[in-house]
Image: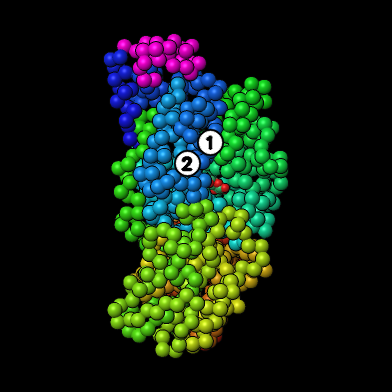
Amino acid sequence: MRSGTATAALALAAAGLFGVAVPSTAQARAGEPAVAARAAGLPVAARAAALPYLDPSLPVATRVTDLLGRMSLDDKVGQMTQSERGTTSAADITAYRVGSVLSGGGSAPTPNTPAGWADLYDGYQRGALATPLQIPILYGIDAVHGNNNVLGSTIFPHNIGLGATRDPALVEKIGRATAEEVTGAGPDWTFAPCLCVARNDRWGRTYESFGEKPEIATAMTTIVDGLQGSRLDGPASVLATAKHFIGDGGTTGGTDQGDTQISEAELRAVHLPPFAAAVRRGVGSVMISYSSFDGVKLHGNKYLITDLLKGELGFTGFVVSDWAAIDQLDGRSGFTQAEVVAGVNAGLDMIMVPTDWKTFVGYLKAAVQSGQIPLSRIDDANRRILTKKFELGLFERPYADRSYASTVGSAAHRALARQAVRESQVLLKNAGGILPLAKTGGKIFVAGKSADDIGNQSGGWTLSWQGASGNTVPGTSILAGIRAAAGSGTTVTYQRDGSGIDSSYRAAIAVVGETPYAEGQGDRTGSMSLDATDLATLSRLRSAGVPVIVVLVSGRPLDVAAEIGNWTALLAAWLPGSEGAGVADVLFGDYAPTGKLPVTWMQSVSQQPINDGDGKTPLFAYGFGLTYAPTQPDPTPTPTPTPTPTDSAPAGACRVRYTTNDWSSGFTGTVALTNTGSTTLAPWTLTWTFAGGQTVTQAWSARVVQSGAAVTATGEAWSASLAPGATVSFGFNGSLSGANPRPAAFSLNGATCTVE
Ligand code: GLC
């Protein structure tokens, strides 16, 4: 929602108090202010007030049609143009009728404060309202983990950590908080969420993905509701963007902007569901991917943009290109009129042209005048864009709503971010139950390049495009969180490289991992191991002979199999953002870890890509995550739901692959369950009986409870139903006192399964 200083003038004029002569349709259609109004020196706004498109009581479609009928080709071309703030003045907006401006990563005004941003935004709006038809601009930014361009904003965990939470309701709240902080700084549009499904951890944008399977990103589209609110013109609602359509996470080798060389069936099964979910939630815009699908650049792919996204999915918002992406269509630098034609005719509605946008305006206009782009395509693009501008309420309230400035970096938002950090932590190893650490007594040594580095813990897209190490944004480092959590009776020593440690410490915490990166600069084509600095620190700590707890700050799984044997515990912290205290909450037991791996964790970089169900044996499976819960299974098991007739699978309508990894006192069980029947089972319940006294202690990717020797597994909220042909994988740890005989039989909703 915007503020409404323009409204008063319009209301007065609408009351006819100025006696303004409503311009003839021809004059209005030409987009030029009525001479009478201008001659009378009246503000142009007074002239426009009498026009239907400015009447908020009319249906949006009516207003769009009226406005479209008054627009010149210059107006229409301008609406399809998005320029960057660094190359655009408010006067440019007026002269070229530019419809949108963006800030690229880190492109901020001075001062970089909410007020500085709101002044920037309002300046462009004044430029827009000085055009004949007074069409407000849309201002787009990458608020991808909070309003991360604005200094002082709450920085939330990046998406890979949010995927580990498996908490769609939490993610919706994060969307709401982000929308408030964006609104308080002025802009009305964020290029988020990224709904990419990262299939190769080498990809530099893996951390922007919610996980390797579409079900997580699909579930997390709740963030669209948080960002857009129940109404786009509601308080603090901002336009969301589902990006990058489609398949950016599935390129060969995980190459950013590479080629997704898979079948259309796989593209639809793996990469499409999150976009379909976002469209169902009414996402206002979709950004196209730089990548190619089977050799065809997405930005020129009419079948995927127009036929699939707009046709089959019924997307009625507008499609925006990525940063200078049309330049890539012919494989040469810069863009040509031919590339403009190809992109717009493929279905691009708004073109992000950061620098040479004046050339773009000329090419687009010429392409329409020459018939290379039909006017119907231009009108469709304008209709889509204008519809969102009307729905956002921009015509009534075009200016920044500064009442939300106080939410920027607020205590409430930081508390929410801290909860998200807690829920995103995934405990991968906890030998001897070293975690949670006691808060009081003795000495704790903290080391590692990311222990006291809020820039590292925030990652890319933080204050700058690539992010940066150092004390970059206000917040709490992981070290500060540890110091605050440890009681006064505990000595916490910090030494970045681990020097000075000795055996007098009861534990060492090493916070290591990756330094910030974004996009292709984060692609890792070679090793995915820890760097030499981290390995040297860990070696020093190990030499003291104290338990070493590793906290991994990274945007993806790293190749740690060779080192993990020397670690007592391993906590995947991902990129937690500004509230590092959430990590300490888990380390000291104020929050028992609940995070589950959103990506499969490789045993070796040679396994990449490695994903659930591909037959490769990981170090840690998709969905794995330990906790501190009592080791005894829930004494009051969840009653097995009585399958209704529609739920019962006919005999043999299921197949189970059951594997175990045993050690002296325990074992890990992994189950792959396939519905070979013809009906969707919702809910599904798999039962079996242990014959050797095995006892389930922890489970992941399913709810597993045991009563005596009988074991029951049911789906998580995000995997509650099992469609025909679908396979769900889940696992559990168990204790045993002797042999580990396989269960004799498995039943799915009452039907006996075949066992591989
Ligand atoms: C970048 C990214 C995209 C972002 C856009 C604007 O290159 O691919 O995710 O929204 O440019 O910053």
| Percent position of residue 274, x then y | 52, 49
Rendered position, 234 above or below 217: above
Residue 628 is inside the magenta segment: no
Observer-nearest residue: 489 or 602?
489
Residue 686 is at least partly visible in this image? no
Observer-nearest residue: 739 or 577?
577
Residue at 41% over, 38% down: 121
Circle 2: residue type? Gly
Residue at 39% over, 77% down: 436
> Going by the picture, which residue comes out furthest to the front?
110
Whether label 2 lies within 8 Å of ligand 1 gets the answer: yes
Q: Give the mark, 1 or 2, whose residue is nearer the N terminus.
A: 1
Q: Which residues are magenta?
A: 19-44
Q: Is disc 1 in contact with disc 2, using a CB cutoff of under 8 Å?
A: yes
User: Tell me, what colour scheme is on the image?
Assistant: rainbow
Task: Please tell me the numbered disc located at residue 140.
Answer: 2
Residue 126 appears left or right of 603: left
Rendered position, 192 above or below 82: below
Which residue does the numbered mark 1 point to in the structure image?
82
Rendered position, 217 above or below 54: below
| Percent position of residue 744, x then y | 56, 75
Residue 474 appears left or right of 681: left
Q: Secondary structure under badge 2?
A: strand
Local packing at callout 2 (Cα closer than 10 Å; few below 14, some 14-19, many 20+) is many
Observer-nearest residue: 701 or 745?
701
Circle 1: residue type? Gln
Residue 70 appears left or right of 21: right
Quarter of the image containing the C terminus? bottom right
Q: Quadrant of residue 526?
A: bottom right
| Percent position of residue 201, x then y | 60, 62
